Amino acid sequence: MKIRILNSAKNDLLSGYFFYERQEKGIGKYFLESLYSDIESLRLFAGIHPVFYGKYYRLLSKRFPFAIYYRIEDDQINIYAVLDCRRKPSWTRKRLTD
């Protein structure tokens, strides 16, 4: 199955990268490697995760407090957002329902 990371999710990944890179050099790269590994796992496990906001599956990252929100459309996995779980749930809800 093909995985497509939408621009909104790419921007989320870049924001996370810069956040962690400011904490300590090299952590941003580790963040991206970890998240891309989690995303790649969807080739095997897409569709088994709980559904949030009525339409998005949510995969929790194994190493960072981030959630990957995706949908399966036709024969493709579309990644819509990669969001920090430490944010207020109302912010996440607004982000995913706008």
Image: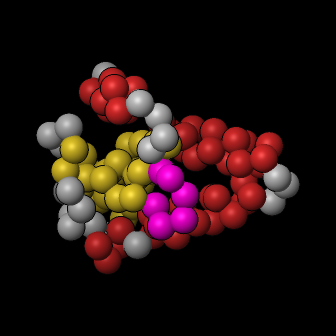
Query: Residue placed at 20% from the left, 37% from the top?
Result: 53
What secondary structure is the magenta-colored segment mainly? loop
Q: Is residue 86 visible?
A: yes
Which quarter of the picture shows residue 59? bottom left
Query: Residue placed at 25% from the left, 53% from the top?
Result: 57
Q: Is residue 6 visible?
A: no
Dividing the image into 4 quarters, which one contains the C terminus? top left
- Count of numbered labels shown in the rendering: 0
> How far across and down, in percent of the image, does residue 44 sit?
31, 77
In this picture, is 57 found above or below 55?
below
Q: Foreground: 83 or 23?
A: 23
On whether residue 62 falls in the magenta region, the answer is yes
Which quarter of the picture shows residue 3? bottom left
Q: Foreground: 51 or 77?
A: 51
Query: Residue placed at 31% from the left, 30% from the top?
Result: 93
Which quarter of the picture shows residue 35? bottom right
Dividing the image into 4 quarters, which one contains the N terminus? bottom left
Q: Foreground: 52 or 89?
A: 89
Q: Which residues are magenta?
A: 61-66
In this picture, is 24 found above or below 46?
above
Q: Residue furthest bottom?
A: 44
On whether residue 26 falls in the magenta region, the answer is no
Q: Is residue 44 left or right of residue 36?
A: left
Q: Residue furthest right?
A: 25
Q: How is the image coloured?
A: secondary structure
Query: Residue placed at 41% from the left, 30% from the top?
Result: 88
> How far across and down, in percent of the image, does residue 28 sit?
72, 54
In this picture, is 50 found above or below 90?
below
> How far across and down, in percent of the image, does residue 95 sit?
37, 28
> How far across and down, in percent of the image, does residue 92 sit?
37, 32
